[in-house]
Amino acid sequence: MTNPTTVPGYLRPGQPQGGQTPLALLVPCRPCGRWHWHGAGTMEGPYYKPGDLTHRSAHCRRLAGSYEWIHVQAEPFDPRWMRNHRRVLSAVTEAYPWPA
């Protein structure tokens, strides 16, 4: 069994719906070069706060288990870290330093 990988996760609010603002936890995935989105509750009732460590499975189709743990960052997600590529939000590695 290999050691689980810990990666940073960034909270990002979505568009308000019915009086609630959905919140996502975006995680960079090195194997596929994309951001994986995990549900994180709402702005009014978030599942996580900065500094939390959460156990989540990667959504990566290229390499199952590319990460198991997400460390929620205090820094909010910055849209400049991604670009639209064939309707998939890809990482812009020049602007975002991938975790080691």
Image (cartoon, grey):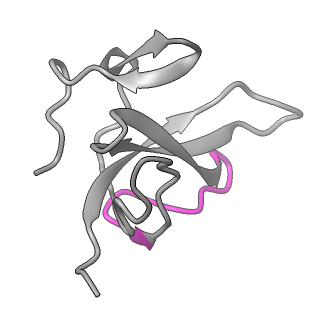
Left or right: residue 80 compared with residue 55: left
Which quarter of the picture shows residue 97?
Answer: top left
Q: Magenta stretch: give its range.
A: 42-54
Reply above or below: 52 against 63.
Answer: below
Residue 85 in the image: above or below residue 5 = above
> Residue drawn at (24%, 81%), measured in percent from left and top?
2
For the image, the number of numbered tags is: 0
Q: Residue furthest right?
A: 18
Asked where in the image residue 50 lies, by quadrant, the reply is: bottom left
Point out the image quarter for the N terminus.
bottom left
Side of 23 relative to 61 (left or right): right
Identity of the residue drawn at 31% across and 63% down: 51
- Residue 64, above or below 87: below
Q: Residue at x 20, y 28 (%)?
A: 96
Q: Quadrant of residue 30?
A: top left
The location of residue 80, given as percent across then percent down, is 33, 15
Report the front residue among 51 and 36: 36
Q: Residue furthest left?
A: 100
Q: Spot the residue most to the bottom.
A: 1
